[in-house]
Each structure stands twice: as structure tokens, then as C-alpha cells.
Amino acid sequence: GLKKVGKALKKGAKAVGKSAKKTAKAVGKSAKKTGKSIKKAFCFGPMTRVLLDDGKFKDMVDIKIGDKLLGGSIVTGTMKFNSKDTYLVDNSGIISTFDHHVLHNGIFKKSGSVPNAKVYTGQIPYLYDIDTSNHRITILNDNNEHIVYTDFTEVDHDNNYVYEYELSLLN
């Protein structure tokens, strides 16, 4: 009895494993084909005004690990990227990559898809981003409005879907 159950479980686990592996490979191949369009997807211009917990702001380029942001979130990482060949948009003075996620009318969207986003044609040698303890960055736009963007990581990876997807891209 128990031996048969054990064999059945092993067989079922193998089938699930093969299916998951095939799905991961298919997703990976699709992602490789579109990889060029998702390169450097989530960054800001250096003078982006990040709101701090004390109500003041710091330019993105000056943000340090440990800074306390509006709402109590803590900066856990800072990044600097070459901006060569990057498609940038201007959302009321917030310069970001087209694909960076921004909260608009209660829904996260690509910043380049927000109404009134304009193509930014200025020259910026480097772009910056941060990681935070809650994956959100509140930024002050030119109209002194608080605009919420995602950080570089965007979401917690508690369910491992993101990690599994990344592994499928690598393999």
C-alpha cells in the first residue's frame, strides 16, 4: 500500500517538474527575444526629488543607504546606470525611463503611458534608482504633487515566481 502511494507521488512530482521546466523554458525564450526592450527599464534622472520622512527632499543622486523616506521606508540600496540609448520621459518634471512603474489613478502604469508624459530629449549621462524597504518611492513633481513610483526591485519575492523566472532566463 504505502510503496504504491510513494511511487505514485514520485511519478506525479516528475510530471509536474517536467511541465514546470517546459513552461519556464518557453517563458525564458520569449523573454530573450524581447530582452532588448526591457533593458534598463527602471531608472530616474539624477535631479529627481525624492521625499524624505522629515518632509524635505533629496535629489536621487544624493540618496544614501539608510535614508528614511516619506512614510518611514528605509533606503536599502542605490544604483547608477549608464543612460546611453535609454528612452526617457518627463512626467511634470520627473525624468524616468519609459517603463518605470508609477501609480496613476490608483493603478500602476508605465510612466511613459501616463497622460501628458512627454519624450525627454535632454542629455543625461547617468540614471539612478534605489531599493527601499517597502518598494515605493514618493517623488515631488514640478507641481509639488507627491507621485508614487516603484523602487528598482518593485515587489517582494516571497512566492519565488520572480526568482524562478530569472533562473529560466539564465538557463
Image: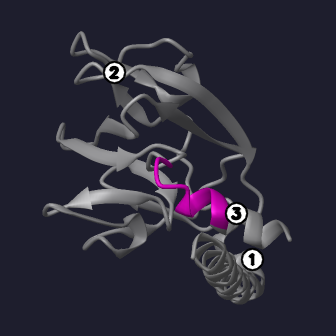
From mark 3 to mark 1, how far is it between C-alphas?
15 Å
Identify the magenta region.
Answer: 157-164
Residue at point 66% right, 53% down? 123
Which residue is denoted by mark 1 in the rendering? 36
Which residue is denoted by mark 3 in the rendering? 166
For label 2, the SS is loop
Closer to the eye: label 2 or 3: 3
Residue at point 70% right, 37% down? 80
**Earlier sequence position, callout 3 versus callout 1:** 1
Where residue 17 sits: x, y (%)?
69, 78
Rendered image quadrant of residue 2: bottom right
- Marker disc for residue 47: none
Is residue 86 visible to us here? no
The image quadrant where one finds the C terminus is: bottom right
Mark 3 crowdedness (10 Å alpha carbons): few <14, some 14-19, many ≥20: some
C-beta proximity under 8 Å, tags 3 and 1: no
C-beta proximity under 8 Å, tags 2 and 3: no
Amino acid type at circle 3 is: Glu
Query: Is 160 inside the magenta-drawn segment?
Result: yes
- Residue 150's place in the image compared with 29, above or below, is above
Rendered image quadrant of residue 166: bottom right
Q: Given the current orientation, which residue lies at the most extreme right position?
A: 171
Amino acid type at circle 2 is: Leu
Where residue 20 sits: x, y (%)?
65, 81
Query: Is 87 inside the magenta-drawn segment?
Result: no
Say whether residue 132 is left or right of residue 171.
left
Which residue is denoted by mark 2 in the rendering? 69
Amino acid type at circle 1 is: Lys
Mark 1 crowdedness (10 Å alpha carbons): few <14, some 14-19, many ≥20: few
Residue at point 46% right, 47% down? 158
